[in-house]
Image (cartoon, rainbow, N blue to C red):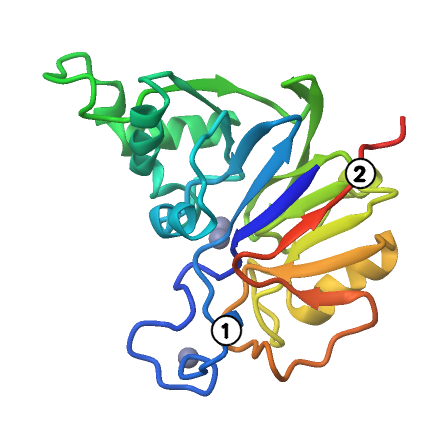
């Protein structure tokens, strides 16, 4: 299996509009972070986690030309508002409907915020994305012959989902992880975990807090994602075995040992 970091930036993206700080002015392409999303490739299938507002640019950058499913972590704009870009995949996939998996809260927000997707009076079949919403809860579910394990985590006052595929776990927006979820994250090859900046934040882990989780779980490798402009790719002290993600990074990982 393979994971591609499509985007590893926080909600504003990096650079931030109008900011002239060292990171926002950096010439290192690894300091340019689109909004957080990953692509998981398993058994020839392409599974997208979240539809970031940068989905168009991300798909073009990595040459993504097919989507078999989308799984949402939560309904915040930086994870959802690129949903209309799914239309382009419908075009190239002969109007095939794309299954979109999400929990009740996220499904509700999709139906409310993007009601045109479900309107019955459409002039053209090409006028809107053709998706099929599929409800999930916190139980593992099957997808294309493999297992996907939801990882409920606290994101400030909200509960949102991370996901485990094989020996890789992706937890993007989190400020604490319940014990039950920590147990679902044992024996990882790769943990991709959100870390906003050095300073604490009520809804996101800081670098030190993410490092604390990594230290307890001891994955073989760990990558930080959902980063703000306060994290400089060229100049950030990290514990051993922890690296900063960057847009376009591809990592292979193994199946889970049952
Ligand atoms: Zn976010
Ligand atoms: Zn900045
Ligand atoms: Zn969020």
Q: Is residue 216 left or right of residue 88?
A: right
Residue 222, percent from left and from top: 75, 58
* Residue at numbered disc 1: 31
Residue sitting at x 38%, y 17%:
97
Q: Is residue 119 left or right of residue 172?
A: left
Dot 1 alpha-carbon crowd within 10 angstroms: few under 14, some 14 to 19, many 20 or more:
many
Tell me: residue 22, above or below residue 91.
below
As measured in the structure, the alpha-carbon distance from the residue carrying label 2 to the one carrying label 1 is 28 Å
Residue sitting at x 72%, y 71%:
208
Residue 70, percent from left and from top: 49, 30
User: Is there any visible trace of residue 77 in the rendered image?
Assistant: no
- Extreme-left residue of the structure: 123
* Residue at numbered disc 2: 254
Tell me: residue 257, above or below residue 77.
above
Residue 121: image quadrant is: top left
Of mark 2 and mark 1, the one earlier in the sequence is 1
Tell me: residue 85, above or below residue 138.
below
Q: Are marks 2 and 1 in contact (CB under 8 Å)?
A: no
């Amino acid at each position: 299996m393979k994971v591609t970091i499509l985007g590893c930036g926080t909600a504003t993206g990096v650079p931030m509009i109008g900011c002239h700080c060292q990171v926002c002015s950096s010439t290192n392409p690894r300091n340019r972070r689109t909004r957080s999303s990953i692509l998981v490739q398993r058994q020839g299938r392409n599974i997208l986690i979240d539809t970031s507002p940068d989905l168009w640019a991300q798909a073009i950058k990595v040459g993504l030309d097919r989507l078999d499913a989308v799984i949402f972590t939560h309904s915040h704009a930086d994870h959802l508002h690129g949903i209309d870009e799914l239309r382009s995949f419908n075009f190239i996939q002969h109007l095939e409907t794309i299954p979109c998996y999400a929990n009740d809260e996220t499904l509700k927000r999709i139906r409310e915020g993007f009601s045109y997707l479900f309107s019955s009076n459409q002039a053209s079949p090409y006028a809107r994305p053709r998706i099929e919403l599929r409800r999930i809860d916190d139980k593992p579910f099957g997808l294309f012959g493999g297992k996907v394990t939801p990882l409920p985590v606290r994101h400030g006052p909200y509960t949102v989902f991370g996901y485990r595929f094989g020996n890789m776990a992706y937890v993007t927006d989190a400020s604490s992880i319940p014990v039950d979820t920590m147990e679902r994250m044992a024996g990882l090859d790769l943990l991709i975990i959100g870390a906003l900046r050095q300073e604490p934040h009520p809804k996101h882990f800081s670098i030190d807090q993410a490092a604390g989780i990594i230290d307890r779980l001891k994955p073989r490798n760990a990558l930080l994602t959902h980063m703000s402009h306060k994290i400089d790719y060229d100049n950030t002290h990290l514990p051993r075995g922890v690296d900063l993600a960057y847009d376009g990074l591809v990592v292979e990982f193994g199946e889970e040992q049952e």
